[in-house]
Amino acid sequence: MRSSIIAHIDMDAFFAAVEQRDHPELLGKPVVVGADPKKGRGRGVVSTASYEARVYGIHSAMPISKAYRLCPHAVFLPGSMKKYSKVSNQIFDIFYDFTPEIEPISVDEAFLDLTGSFHFYKTPYNTCVALKERIKKETRLTASVGIAPVKMAAKIASDLCKPDGLLEIKEGGLLDFLWPLKIEKLWGVGPKTKETLNRMKIETIGDIARTPLEILRNRFGENGEHLYSLANGIDPRQVVLEEEAKSVSNEHTFERDTADKDEIYRTLLYLSEKVSRRLRKDNLKGKTLTVKIRLADFKTYTRAFTYPERTNFTDTIYRKAKEVFDGFYKSGMKVRLLGVRLSHFNDPYVQENLFEDEKNVRLEKIHRAVDSVKNRFGEDAIRHGFPKSID
């Protein structure tokens, strides 16, 4: 059985790089794309930091207030997902010129299976050189690429060769590449797992590979077996083609941590409206609702519910999101962020019930009418009424 050839492509500081490309006066300057820092009092997080900003210790997902403290003279930008999505589509069009087997990870990252398509350029390495050159020529942006026989190693390779790098790991050298690396390079090794492994005198991926499987299984359960396999270069996960969206979600970070139930409910309603409208715009209905709750201490929790039938109705989403939140909430809790997500799509708008009741048909027409008003007159042209909470 022939070995797979998998490439992991990751654009370099994507959002910030697009801004520097479009605004040459930003070249060479620390650029941070994300929430408004409000001179160190801002909420939200960093989306992307340019390499000049990373010198100061700024990185993605860092609180924007901390980023400001680390580098107050950085250029802070709100960003434009519309612009980034347009560039992303351009990049993915290039990917499809090299292989149809693509697994998108985000707007600026993907796995490509080159096993059956590298022969035009003779070698996988030459293929990825050509791919990088196309991206640079057509978008004036750089990408880092890792090539390996397994996904896990391809991802590690692209991380290690940033920025604008290309690193190929061949099957015969896979373990020589993996074993000297620190354990945190492996998928699934977070801070807590790292701490536990370090207490076991396990520092490198090679140390994991040399640890008896039974010891790892006893300590970590199924995850111990997973770590053992990865450390020995075994990763059966294939490139999974993504033909449709996995989920539709919206989030909101409060200006101040809040325990105000009315404010929380209003936000859940607003997020439910946003998700509902986006679902209809893409002709989708979701079956699984997930509510994301981040508290004042930055601890983040998710609670999920699966509907008996798929939906994209605002009221249906909001009522259950409110119920899920109430089941989680304890008196005095202060909430920093809320999110609402719908997932578990099947074929768009496949009617699950051939005898759909008239009420749903009427609701569908009402939602579509509201969408039309908003499309013409703006988001605030018509809003759901909001009842006060009853304690």
Image (spheres, rainbow, N blue to C red):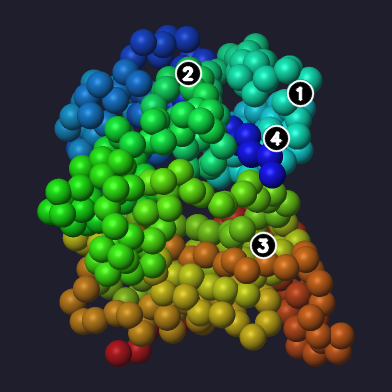
Q: From the image, tell me which residue sits under label 1.
A: 119
- In primary-sequence order, the first of circles 2 and 3 is 2
* Structural distance between the alpha carbons of marks 1 and 4: 9 Å
Instruction: Specify the label residue 217 is tagged with.
Output: none
- In primary-sequence order, the first of circles 2 and 1 is 1
Q: From the image, tell me which residue sits under label 4.
A: 115
The answer to whether any part of residue 376 appears in the image is: no
Q: Position of residue 275 (x, y in %)?
A: 58, 62
| Element under disc 4 | loop
Q: Position of residue 235 (x, y in %)?
A: 51, 49
Front of the two marks 4 and 2: 4
Q: Is residue 79 above or below residue 124?
A: below
| Element under disc 1 | helix
Q: From the image, tell me which residue sits under label 3.
A: 279
* Structural distance between the alpha carbons of marks 2 and 3: 38 Å
Q: Position of residue 244 (x, y in %)?
A: 70, 54
Q: From the image, tell me which residue sits under label 2.
A: 165
Type of amino acid at the residue the image marks with label 3: Leu
Q: Are marks 3 and 1 in contact (CB under 8 Å)?
A: no
